[in-house]
Image: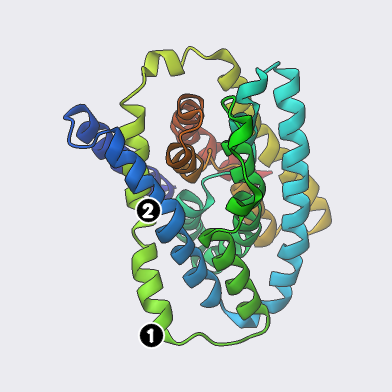
Amino acid sequence: MTALITTMIKLFFSMAIGYFLKKRNIINDTVSRSVSALIVNISAPCLMFSSIVTMDSSQFQNALTLLWVGVLVYVGLILLAVLVVKLLKIEEAARGVYKAALIFGNVSFLGIPLAQSLYGQEGVFYIALLNIHFMLLFFSYGIYMIMTSGGNKGSFSPKKLVNSGLISIIAATLLYFLRIPVPDMIVEPLSFVGSLTSPVSMIIVGSSIASYSLKKVFSMKKLYIMSVLKLLVFPIIAYFILKLTLGDNLLTKIVCIYIGMPTASIVGMTAMAYGTDVENTTSCITMMTVLSLVTIPIIYIVMLYL
């Protein structure tokens, strides 16, 4: 539990730096957009490529299991997201970012250090493998939802789906499953650049939070409902289903932690980079990230004792 708390403190410390820098006008909107574009197009793809190609090939069978489990997870999340935004009667223009907020969790920036703290390198391996699904879906369907949100129906072009994130994740996946080794002289520089992603993205998220009223964010009643569903209901239901099918093992626990992550900061980075519905996106990230400080320990306790 101490390791879990330490990880959450790191996250909020980075966000607090961004909040302070924005309040002091050291970071402005122009800087936020530029850095967001850097994260989305360069550092995040580098991080995922280096993480996947360096995974341990001895866990090949578990990797295959997680591939089909990951597909089922995202099919379920997409269907649930569509259902939730309809039941909550979210306005049409904002449905894209709200669905993205429910589907895509902060698995890279929070999930990986959390898995490492709780379950060691094996946990990191499983989280990184599940991120294949995240990246494939986010850099296609996710970007589409975000770009067409906020009433920008005419801003989307299918050509924009061919981006560095999608290319890097497809290349890394093929290299891993074909068991083609990648030289350290390639992996190390990519890993070095990718290491920027976690702290810098949370600093930018913190700066974006400073642009909005926290009082207003935490007065949005529908966001509380969405947060409880994403952070508690979805992962706990998944835990009991997977426990019956896969068993009470590390695979099951990692998948549940994966599902229970707060909205990914890259959702906010992408909204900033494309200039679409940043306020609603930031509100989702802000509330869910704050509430996850409570919900993640609850999920951990449920898996530990039930």
**Sequence-wise, which precedes: disc 2 or disc 1?**
2
SS under mark 2: helix
216 or 211, which is in the foreground? 211
Q: Which residue carries the number 2 mark?
A: 38
SS under mark 1: helix
Q: Residues within 10 Å of mark 1 (few under 14, many from 20)?
A: few
105 or 196, which is in the foreground? 196
Name the image quarter holding the C terminus.
top right
Answer with left or right where residue 169 lies relative to residue 25.
Answer: right
At 59% across and 60% down in the image, what residue appears? 166
Residue type, mark 1 in image: Met
Is residue 47 something that shows in the picture?
yes
Task: Residue 221: give x, y in percent of width and height.
Answer: 56, 13
126 or 273, which is in the foreground? 273
At 63% across and 42% down in the image, what residue appears? 144
Task: Residue 54: give x, y in percent of width and height.
Answer: 51, 77
| Count of numbered badges drawn on the protein | 2
Task: Residue 193: give x, y in percent of width and height.
Answer: 35, 66
Residue type, mark 2 in image: Leu
Answer with left or right where residue 90 lies relative to residue 246.
Answer: left
Q: Which residue carries the number 1 mark?
A: 185
At 67% across and 21% down in the image, what residue appears? 92
Task: Residue 249: give x, y in percent of width and height.
Answer: 69, 60
Is there CB contact under 8 Å for labels 2 and 1?
no
How was the colour assigned to the protein in this rendering? rainbow
Q: Residues within 10 Å of mark 2 (few under 14, many from 20)?
A: some
At 71% across and 71% down in the image, what residue appears? 62
Residue 149 to residue 34: above or below: above
Residue 236 to residue 86: above or below: below
Q: Of the residues tagged 2 and 1, which is closer to the observer?
A: 2
